[in-house]
Image (tube, grey):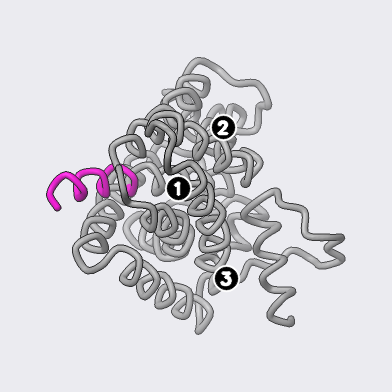
Amino acid sequence: MKLFDRFRSTLLFLTRIPLGPSGLSLKICPEQFPVIGAFLGLVLWGLWVLTSSFPSLIRSVLLVMVWILLTGGLHIDGWADTWESALYAGSVEDKLRIRKDPHLGVYGVLAIVFLPVFKIACLSGWNDRSLWIMAVPIFSRGVLPLTMKTLRFLNPGIPYSAGLGEMAMASFSGSAFYSGILLTVLSCGYLLGIGGTLFIVTGWVIWVMIALWVLKRSDSLSGDFMGWSIEGLEAVSLFVLLIGSMHS
């Protein structure tokens, strides 16, 4: 598959941005994950610059709105479904049914409400940190393959969901996997510096611990769970970088 086709296929997998008729079978290319994150980050950085004279709260609301629109709410759907099934105390079969149900319960609605509010609150405290906004989508997508492999290693009993989960995990290997991780680290090191990179890696460790608890209460390692992880990694990264900005 050509480089642009790999980029386009991954863009269609991670966002809802139409990039012409695909004509391609879905292929997950982990080395393109941080590239897609950089694409999203550039748009957000441009909006940050354009709204630099706005009050920080208004700027943060606009950033989060555009952030959601760029992904078409794709990952937020997984965010809501995963929390709803994880917090339900029933059987594995009931959890699977809840995750596949197009209707949302109370836990799903609360999850959708709290997430953008939390992101807006974190961004409001960043002040003059425009380059950081580029690093968050790069990091959250770039480390997704490593996150999934780490969770699988720490919880080997969790099954893959049929289809997307199984296909994604099979693709998270080889040179493409390591290339994606290396590109993610180098990009974050450049945009955040050593201190910021250490903070965001600390956020990743915190998220892995949260994800382990949720995964134990989930029915499988699924596409919804990967979307949930991307949103969670973004939220935790925003928070730890906020803490970092307060100490720099």
Residue 32's disc is 3
**Magenta region:** 237-248
Q: Earlier in the sequence, mark 1 or mark 2?
A: 2
Q: Which residue is mark 1?
A: 229
Among all residues in the image, which is located at the extreme front? 53
Q: Quadrant of the N terminus?
A: bottom right
Residue visible at 50% across and 56% down in the picture: 41
Q: Is residue 136 above or below residue 91?
A: below
Of 71 and 101, which appears nearest the observer? 71
State if disc 2 and disc 1 touch (CB < 8 Å). no
Q: Which residue is mark 2?
A: 93
| Amino acid type indicated by mark 1 | Ser
Residue 54's disc is none
State if disc 2 and disc 3 touch (CB < 8 Å). no
Give x and y (percent) for residue 135: 40, 59
Q: Is residue 70 magenta?
A: no
Residue 8, image quadrant = bottom right
**Numbered circles on residues, count:** 3
Foreground mark, 3 or 2, reads 3
